[in-house]
Image (cartoon, rainbow, N blue to C red):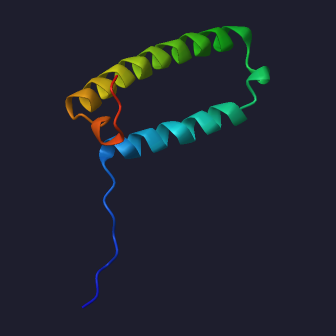
Amino acid sequence: MSGIGTTFEHPAAEAVAGMAACLDALAAANVWSMPAGELASLLVDVEVVARRLDAARVSLAAQAETARVAEPEGATS
């Protein structure tokens, strides 16, 4: 019996791919057609998401430091 050929992608990698797809959708959206109030609210929402992304980036960088991912590349700092 041959293998099914499925591959595992870590949930974190899947989440990043999903965020990239969502950013593509946002970039393609016609926000010029939004009423000013909705646009203002959207801008606040985007800022909140950006701050959450920054927090995730810091957490990921800390984990990468703990896992010493730079060592195989000879990075010293």
Q: Tell me residue 74's x, y (percent).
A: 34, 36
Q: In the rendered view, does 6 fall on the left or right side of 49?
A: left
Q: In the rendered view, does 42 fall on the left or right side of 18?
A: right
Asked which quadrant contains residue 35, the reply is top right
Report the number of discs. Answer: 0
Residue at the image point whose x is 44% and y is 14% from the top: 51
Q: Tell me residue 64's x, y (percent).
A: 28, 32
Q: Which residue is farthest right? A: 32
Which residue is at the front of the view, 14 or 44? Answer: 14
Which residue is at the front of the view, 67 or 1? Answer: 67
Residue at the image point whose x is 39% and y is 46% from the top: 14
Above-or-below relation of 4 to 8: below
Which residue is at the front of the view, 56 or 66? Answer: 66
Residue at the image point whose x is 32% and y is 35% from the top: 70
Q: Tell me residue 49's x, y (percent).
A: 47, 19
Residue at the image point whose x is 58% and y is 34% from the top: 23
